[in-house]
Image: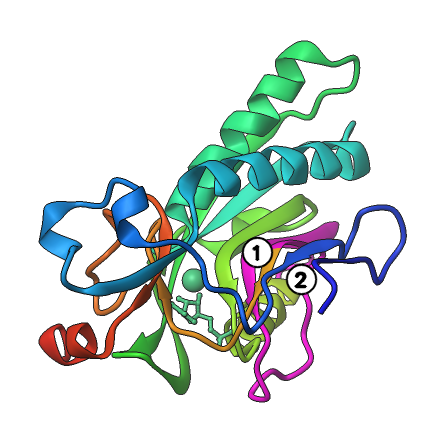
Amino acid sequence: MERFKMTGPCNMNLTCVIPDDEKGYELDLFCVPKHYEEDLDRVIIPHGLIMDRTERLARDIVRDMGGHHIVALCVLKGGYKFFADLLDYIKALNQNCDKSVPLTVDFIRLKSYCNDQSTNRVKVIGGDELSTLTGKNVLIVEDIVETGRTMETLLSLLSECNPKMVKVVSLLVKRTPRSSGYRPDYMGFEVPDWFLVGYALDYNEYFRDLSHICILNEKAKVKYKL
Ligand code: IMP
Ligand code: MG
C-alpha cells in the first residue's frame, strides 16, 4: 500500500497512509502513563509525528484560506488536542509570514459512540449557537472520521446557518467498509479499521490523557466497558 496518497488538487486530500500491516512500536520504546501500561497493545502514531503532520496541515490551511477570517470550530471532546496544536501552528505562521488569517474559535459537543461502537445516532450535547457562524468561513476541526455520519450531520446542521465557506480538517480518517464515502478537505493520517485511543481520542472517556495514538487491547475494552 502506498504510504502517501494524493487524490485532489494541491495538498488537499493528501494524507499519510498507515497500512493494515503496520506494526507500530513497542510501548517500552516510549513514555506512556503507568495507569495505562496494561491497557495498550502498541503505539501506532507517536506524539512527535502527530505534531509534525499537524504543522504541515496548518501550512496547507493557511495557504488555502489565508486572507479570510477563519472561525475554527472544535468538535468536542475528541478534537480538543488536535484543535489546540493546529491553532498554535496557524498562530505561528500568522506571526512569521506575509499572509496571515485572523482566527476566532467556537466549540460544539457531539456524541455518537458507546464502548468501541458507533451508535448510529449523532447527538449535539452542547456548545455555542451555530447561528453565530452565518456568513463566516468555518474550519471544522475533528479528531477522527469513521463512518462519516458525525461530520455529515454537523455539515447539514451548519448549512442551515448559511456560512460563507466550510472546510473540514480531521486528524485521522479510518479505512472501513462502514464509511459513507465522506472525505474531509484536510486529513492527517488514514488509518486501518482499528479502535484507536490517545491524543484526546477516548474509550468511554479514558485515554484522553495519553500523548501517543495507540491500539487498545481486548482486556482493556472489558475493563473500561460501560
Ligand atoms: P463517525 O460518525 O462514524 O465518522 O465517527 C466519528 C466519531 O466517532 C469521532 O468523532 C470519534 O468521537 C468517534 N470514533 C470513531 N472511531 C474512533 C476510534 O477509533 N477511537 C475513538 N473514537 C472514535
Ligand atoms: Mg470526534
Quadrant of the rendering where the C terminus is positioned: bottom left
Residue 105 in view: no
User: Disc 2 beta carbon < 8 A from ligand 1?
Assistant: no
Q: Disc 1, disc 2: CB below 8 Å?
A: yes
Looking at the image, residue 133 sits to the left or right of residue 38; the answer is: right
Q: Amino acid at mark 2?
A: Pro
Residue at the spot 57% in from the left edge and 39% down from the top edge: 54
Q: Secondary structure at mark 2?
A: loop
Mark sitting earlier along the chain (1/2): 1
- Residue 170: mark: 1
Residue 40 to residue 47: above or below: below
Q: CA distance from mark 1 to mark 2?
A: 6 Å
**Residue name at image x 65 percent, y 40 percent:** 57
Nearer the observer, 88 or 166: 88
User: Mark 1 belongs to which amino acid?
Assistant: Ser
Bin the neighbour count of mark 2 within 10 Å (Cα to Cα): few under 14, some 14-19, many 20 and up: many
Give the residue at x 55% y 42%.
72
Instruction: Please state the quadrant of the image where ligand 2 appears.
Output: bottom left
- Is residue 191 visible in the rendered image? The answer is yes
Q: Nearer the viewer, residue 28 or 5?
A: 28
- Residue 184 marker: 2
Image mark for residue 33: none
Q: Which residues are magenta?
A: 161-188
Residue extending furthest right?
9
Q: Quadrant of residue 91?
A: top right
Badge 1 crowding class, 10 Å Cα cut-off, few under 14, some 14 to 19, many 20 or more, is many
Report helix, strand or loop for mark 1: strand
Q: Position of residue 155 (x, y in %)?
A: 61, 67
| Image position of 108 (left or right of 77) | right
Name the image colouring.
rainbow
